[in-house]
Image (spheres, grey):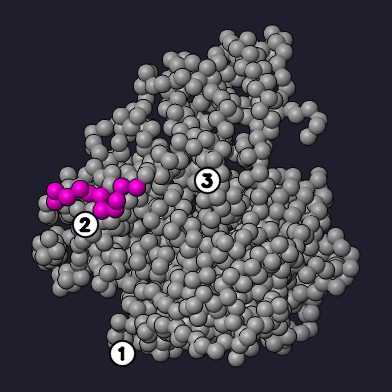
Amino acid sequence: MSDNLYKPDLMEVLQVERQTADVKSVRVRFQDAARARDFSFRVGQFGLFSAFGAGESTFNICSSSTWKDYLEFCFRRTGRVTEALWEIESGDTIGFRGPYGNGYPMEAWEGKDLIFIGGGIAMPPIRCAVWYALENRSDYGNITVVYGARTVRDLTFARELDEWSRHERVRVVQCVDPGGETPDWKGEVGLIPSVVERARISAANAVALVIGPPIMIKFTLPVLDRMGLREEDIYTSLENRMKCGVGKCGRCNAGPVYVCKEGPVFTMRQLRSIPNDF
Amino acid sequence: MSPIISAAALRELIDVWIKSGKQVAAPVSIAGRLLYQRIDSSGQAVLDSALRPANSIKDFVFPRHERLFGYRIEGRQISLTDPKPEERDQIVIGAKPCDAHALPILDHVFAWGSNDEPYERGRRRTAIVALACTAHDDACFCTSVGSSPADETGADAMLFDLGNGSFELKAITAKGRTLFTQHAQPPATEPRPSGSAPAPRFDPAKIRAFLATQFESPFWAEGTLACLGCGACAYTCPTCHCFDIVDEGSAAEGARVRNWDSCQFPLFTAHASGHNPRSNQAQRQRQRMYHKFAIYPEKFGAILCTGCGNCARNCPAGLGVLGVLEAIDRQTIKTDERQPVQT
Amino acid sequence: MSEAFEPKIVAYVCNWCTYLGADLAGTNRLEYPPNVRVLRLPCTGRIDFNLIVKAFEAGADAVLVSGCHPADCHYTSGNYHARRRWIVFRRLLETLGFEMERIHFTWISAAEGKKWQQVVTEITEKTRRLGPYTAYRDLCEAHQ
Amino acid sequence: MITRLRETCRRLLDQNKVQVVIGYGQRRPGAAAHPVFITRPEDVGQLTWGGNCFANLTVYLKRKEVKALGKAALVVKGCDERALVVLEKEAQVERGDLYVIGMACDGVHAPKCSACVVRTPRFADELIGEAGSAPGAASPAAPDLLDVLMAKPAAERWAFWKSEFSRCVKCYACRQVCPLCYCERCIVDKNRPVTIDTSASLKGNFAWHITRAFHLAARCVGCGECTRACPAGIPVGLLNRSLADTAKGNFGYAAGMDPAAEPVFGAWSSSDKEDFIR
């Protein structure tokens, strides 16, 4: 491996899947077989993915760390890099640096019920943890996934949501904003905080992972509080702008915390102790 | 006692360095302004212990624009090439102590968790010969951040201007000793002129106390109104080190480069979604002050400031970090404004 | 460098006159040097100065900007606006010490296939004599 | 003059005619004046006036943080006021939302003063003082840098700018300090597509300075703030001046002088010269 911190590994694109009108997921594998063999990561970690000539962007590794042959990431088409990534096809080459960040404490969550709450493009960083838990099924209690998007067409990984719900002790609650439903929509209609409240999820021995727009998190937290979840049992993943991913370029900090190195995963209790700078 | 070296001998030595293929940088006078620049003859160097350049020496170890690697796209295949590393020895002569001091401070972050190879190489190949200050101006405040006009931190060798056309030479590191092996002359007998230290400009304890409790203070909006949001302070600061990474080139080939960036620019933290955690100048100024005087000290045990005063000297709005610090120093912290201390 | 130098010339032309003029040169089988790369824009009024800079950054040895004769603009006054901008832009390039013989402005109508042929031939020959625009290329390859 | 200035500002604030006064203050004797923002009548004592008031305060009219303070009274010199004329012409300033305090000026020891044409503001809501009979130039007449430059052969001019721009670090002080650089998002900050390399390389620096100068062509009022602000000592304002000369010579236009004059690029004439077009 190069000692050049900023030089990515080259990855072969295996598969590109269109999730929504502006979201795609991509499966890639290391070109270098030895690197592929040695590579490991924790779910919840992220990488910097490059489209050469356009630049690199930060995305969660949304595949499970138990899957050994490839990595997946998912992005929404919003800027220069994602415009370029939007054009890639299987067989193309992209770059990857990582894994970076702390990841989810999956070991600490063993023996507990898992509650995953996500909105919109927040599914990928939840998906990796769901798959990890399913592949280590005996280590975890009940799994509840509450996932919402503006409309039915904005739901990502829709097939997998159905697949998860067929697993034992797994409940998937899908919801769309009022007006976003289709005639044959069987899921919930409503905003995530109220859907979570209606879902009557047992929080007795649970941890929650809540990822989504700040406004969604803000209104979901009181619901979780009423359910009896403690702040230290509610986790989230921050998405601050990053360039280096390794704590040097100076832009991702929230107060004294460098999100790229000391995050992106925090408990709500940790977040409350750092300044509102994210 | 350290040896002395005449100014003439020093210039001869600089030319020897240059002729032997070393890169040499020094303060140079350009249109009435002193700036650190690479030189190709000792005659360009302005070795004046009373003058402070308007930029910093960080450009020589952490360049404003640097290639991280090259890329070449051929069909679906991509090849990456490491840049040809600059391995020549480099000497910065006549660095101000406040510039030299910045490098050991920067070492912390560039080695934090992982080694930043380009920076590390820049450090490895560079020797710093600092020139102790004998004068200060209205913007100098080294003494307020725990430094002094003759601070040796970060220097491989120190020169002290004896005021008679010669310098007392003190080698500090092995690298510094190697530079001057041929010039071990008779020891200095005259006493070093004592540098004129700037009077304290603010109370560091008060700054600490303010930052510890006043993150949400209205001061940040009121006290930073003059800031125009340029990067003149950051880019001439010896310790500011934030950077951007971008690809430059054609669709066929190009390079990923790293460029200086500044927390004072709105786009610095703007998310792709449009959300910006620091969407106004007050928040950006606040970040700058916290980074330098709270976050960096907490993480690495060093203030991210050497008191060189370039921020104030170069600020078109007469503010700079110094201006904000002085304004904080004038604040009275009202108890009802206190915030819970951060953990 | 001993190999014959073939200048790279970028021509920004308007859609309505010069592009058709160049096309006419083609249909009339008028031969002209292949050194020119034609880039078609709606109007000379749309030919932003940054495009000219970009051409030199990309290694052009000369740039030609061409559109409709005065009073002939498809959009009534795009070429008049462009002419004003060129007057000022040329002054900027002069102040910078740009090699002014490498930037050319012409009016070529849809009927002037012959003029297109002449202009391109002359610019190519002139640029060939000048040699490559090394001053700009050095700039772009310099790494400080 | 200072007393009158303070009285005026106290009155304006007392009567709530304006919510903020943008003026000059001074921290220490001998120091350059710096911008102050006075919102309380009791603070008008901070206001000062004199030969050290270099800054062109009209730049603050573009700052959203300053706009948020409410209606402003703005202290201007005659030269600064020209920027106001352009801003109004370009619909950036609503003159009725502004109270202009014009200061008759005897020069601020800046090179630009030697060519001063407006020593007394012409459009102020209130004019303070009378320009003395002394010549505006405080500095001895030095050979004009632009004349010297233009007398040189092109290759030397090129070498000059190459050397000057090699020092540019892309801090954008020249842009930020300019009252007329008010774009919401500067072209150099746009990346779809990248028009100007953001690197402080010679290539990126030339592209930047060409763009900056041309975007200000026939708009720049020659306040000289860009040159003053450049930490690398690059006389960037020379380019603007050169273009102002051309605007004057070819179109008889001087930016910010005649509010009724049509902006150079907002108009055209069938008689514009075209000796360079074949």
| Helix, strand or loop for disc 1 | helix
Residue identified by numbered label 3: D160
Q: Position of residue B90 (x, y in %)?
A: 68, 68
The residue at the point 67 percent across, 17 percent down is: C121
Q: Which mark's residue is nearer the viewer, 3 or 2? A: 3
Disc 3 with disc 2 on a shared chain: yes
Instruction: Find out whether the residues at labels 1 and 3 contact each other: C-beta distance under 8 Å.
Output: no
Can residue C57 be seen here?
A: yes
Q: Please name the amino acid that badge 1 sits on.
A: Thr
- How far apart are the alpha carbons under marks 2 and 1? 36 Å
Disc 2 with disc 1 on a shared chain: no
Residue identified by numbered label 2: D75
Q: Nearer the viewer, residue A93 or B177?
A: B177
Q: What's the chain of the residue with tag 2?
A: D
Q: What's the chain of the residue with tag 1?
A: B
Q: Earlier in the sequence, mark 3 or mark 2?
A: 2
Position of D134 compared to B191: left or right?
left
Q: Please name the amino acid that badge 2 sits on.
A: Val
| Helix, strand or loop for disc 2 | strand
Mark 3 is surrounded, within 10 Å at the Cα level, by few (under 14), some (14 to 19) or many (20 or more) other residues, namely some
- How far apart are the alpha carbons under marks 3 and 2? 37 Å
Quadrant in which the N terminus of chain B appears: bottom right
**What residue occupies the far right of the structure in this picture?**
A33
The residue at the point 45 percent across, 79 percent down is: B134
* Figure quadrant of residue D253: top left
Instruction: Find out whether the residues at labels 3 and 2 contact each other: C-beta distance under 8 Å.
Output: no
Mark 2 is surrounded, within 10 Å at the Cα level, by few (under 14), some (14 to 19) or many (20 or more) other residues, namely many
- How far apart are the alpha carbons under marks 1 and 3? 58 Å
Residue identified by numbered label 1: B335
Task: Magenta stretch: give its range.
Answer: D132-142
